[in-house]
């Protein structure tokens, strides 16, 4: 494809992009396809001759678009949002065009220095206090893996890296029973073994119980096992529970244990001064992660990972073969030493575009509105005789179940609610997902897509009621 053709197609595609965003609310939210539907439309082998972009684009519309779940649909209330915004998309277009590899300062100086500065902006925007340095990871899962690796190395004085785990005392990692599955996976990947993860009991708010954490730590120490890492979660994925950070932090300091904070979703709410009670005790944290790619208007992938001791991080992950040395090695940041993969995308540009274009105040307005709509919905649910809140609202996450008049049997209610979630998502007007909490099948309703309006929330509730009535 020559540059003139590229220019023509690129203009057409920008028109497609704007049109998609204009009409996405007319599409079903969750893709209405069956497993194999897409595969059946894709040739079993690659074409030998190049094809016209117009043919490729026609197939994209015909095959791909119907097979996509529309995360930017204003009635997407499932999982957590993976929201986007026009300035983020524009930045990604530029990044992809330059196709820069940002592993070393030298391979993209602007990307490195922008990344450092954006992480400084974010630390201030969230009120994280002084003393953190930052790196953008591809995901919270990766940030937590890195945290566990650093904690592992600190606990073994870097012997695990040198000799392998066979040469060191057994280690343990602690997180609440409600913590994200990525923590268990990261413990496995770090070679500690799944059983090294202690799932600490939670209270009636589903928050970790500090006394249980300390008891588990002491039991491990007595058994000759070394506590290496505690992961505190601010905003669990199931129900949005918040662990008591200060109490956990004090335990970690008493026992000299690495403390990582997973605020993947809820961290964005820290832009709002009135939400900062959850980071009381942050001075005890060794690292903190949140995902601008969830709720902060920035396309996946963009996970903000703050670290207190970058020297320990680099010592854990740095390897310097001759072909990666540069004149600047040692005097600049080479972010390849801050994450597991060597190659890195230029992820800071979209943050720069989003933050400048929306302004911190613009983002705060949207978040405050969404939290207000969640409060309104909480009141609606409380007033609805056929619905029952199962967990107090957390920011914009509501966890409830439908309770048809006269239905009291728990198993019957579970089956009804599961049916309801499937019926809602097959209907396509909105998208919801489920969790299990205190033994019940529960429906999660999360507000957070960039373009959602209060009317979208109220009409979604009306849709849900109508669909429930038809079951
Ligand atoms: C979404 C989520 C994760 C995983 O985030 P990725 O960026 O997809 O790895 C981890 N922890 C919590 C609490 C989450 O909500």
Image (cartoon, helix red, strand yellow):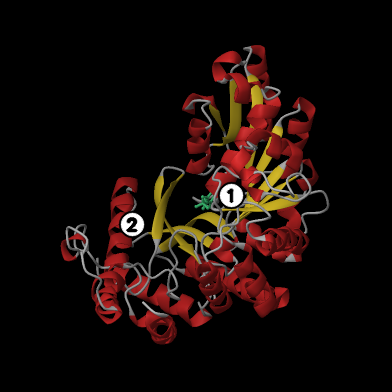
The C terminus appears in which quarter of the rendering? bottom left
Say whether residue 397 is left or right of residue 250: left
Q: Quadrant of residue 269?
A: bottom right
Q: Which of pointers 2 and 1 indicates the residue nearer the eye?
A: 1
**Residue nearer the viewer, 161 or 380:** 161
Which residue occupies 64% across, 60% down? 108
Question: What is the crowding at mark 1: few (fewer than 14 residues within 10 Å), some, or many (at least 20)?
Answer: many
Spot occupied by residue 175 in the image (x, y as percentages of width and height):
59, 36
The vertical placement of 50 against 442, above or below, is below
Say whether residue 186 is left or right of residue 320: left
Spot occupied by residue 186 in the image (x, y as percentages of width and height):
52, 37
Residue at mark 1: C-beta within 8 A of ligand 1: no
The residue lying furthest to the right in this view is 130
Contact, mark 2 vs mark 1 (Cβ under 8 Å): no
Which residue occupies 45% across, 76% down? 74
Q: Quadrant of residue 219?
A: top right
The vertical placement of 235 against 204, above or below, is below
The vertical placement of 325 against 46, above or below, is above
Spot occupied by residue 6 in the image (x, y as percentages of width and height):
41, 81
**Residue nearer the viewer, 69 or 394:** 69
Which residue occupies 73% across, 36% down? 312
**Disc ID at residue 417:** 2
Task: Name the element at disc 2.
Answer: helix
Which residue occupies 76% across, 47% down? 282
Residue wearing tag 1: 241
Q: Earlier in the sequence, mark 2 or mark 1?
A: 1
Q: Quadrant of residue 22?
A: bottom left
Q: Please say whether residue 237 is visible from this viewpoint.
A: yes
Question: What is the crowding at mark 2: few (fewer than 14 residues within 10 Å), some, or many (at least 20)?
Answer: many
Residue at mark 2: C-beta within 8 A of ligand 1: no
**Residue nearer the viewer, 111 or 251:** 111
**Disc ID at residue 184:** none
């Amino acid at each position: 494809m020559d540059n003139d053709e590229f220019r023509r197609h690129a203009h057409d595609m920008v028109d497609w992009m704007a049109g998609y965003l204009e009409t996405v609310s007319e599409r079903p939210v969750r893709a209405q396809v069956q497993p194999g539907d897409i595969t059946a439309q894709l040739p079993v082998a690659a074409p030998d001759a190049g094809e016209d972009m117009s043919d490729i684009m026609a197939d994209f519309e015909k095959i791909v678009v119907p097979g996509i779940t529309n995360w930017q649909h204003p009635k997407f209330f499932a999982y957590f949002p993976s929201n986007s915004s026009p300035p983020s998309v524009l930045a990604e277009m530029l990044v992809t065009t330059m196709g820069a590899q940002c592993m070393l300062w030298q391979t993209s100086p602007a990307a490195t220095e922008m990344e450092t500065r954006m992480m400084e902006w974010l630390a201030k925007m969230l009120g994280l206090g002084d003393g953190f340095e930052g790196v953008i990871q591809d995901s919270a899962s990766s940030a937590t893996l890195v945290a566990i690796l650093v904690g592992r190395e600190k606990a073994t004085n870097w012997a695990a890296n040198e000799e392998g785990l066979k040469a060191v005392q057994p280690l343990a990692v602690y997180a609440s029973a409600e913590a994200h599955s990525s923590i268990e996976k990261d413990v496995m990947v770090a070679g500690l073994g799944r059983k090294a993860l202690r799932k600490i009991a939670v209270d009636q708010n589903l928050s970790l119980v500090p006394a249980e954490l300390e008891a588990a730590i002491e039991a491990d120490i007595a058994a000759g096992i070394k506590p290496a890492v505690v992961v505190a979660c601010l905003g669990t994925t199931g129900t949005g529970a918040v662990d008591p950070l200060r109490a956990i932090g004090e335990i970690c300091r008493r026992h000299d244990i690495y403390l990582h904070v997973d605020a993947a979703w809820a961290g964005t709410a820290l832009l709002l001064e009135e939400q900062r009670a959850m980071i009381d005790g942050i001075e005890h944290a060794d690292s903190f992660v949140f995902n601008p790619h969830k709720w902060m208007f920035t396309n996946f992938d963009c996970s903000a990972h703050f670290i207190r001791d970058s020297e320990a991080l680099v010592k854990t992950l740095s390897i310097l073969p001759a072909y990666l040395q540069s004149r600047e090695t040692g005097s600049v940041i080479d972010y390849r030493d801050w994450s597991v993969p060597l190659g890195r995308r230029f992820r800071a540009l979209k943050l720069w575009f989003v933050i400048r274009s929306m302004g911190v105040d613009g983002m705060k307005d949207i978040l405050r509105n969404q939290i207000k709509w969640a409060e309104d919905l909480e009141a609606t649910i409380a007033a609805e005789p056929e619905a029952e809140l199962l967990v107090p609202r957390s920011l914009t996450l509501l966890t409830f179940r439908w309770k048809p008049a006269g239905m009291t049997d728990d198993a019957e209610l579970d089956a009804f609610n599961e049916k309801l979630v499937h019926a809602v998502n097959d209907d396509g007007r909105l998208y919801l997902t489920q969790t299990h909490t205190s033994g019940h099948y529960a429906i999660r309703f999360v507000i957070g897509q960039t373009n959602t309006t209060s009317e979208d929330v109220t009409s979604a509730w009306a849709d849900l009621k109508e669909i429930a009535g038809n079951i």
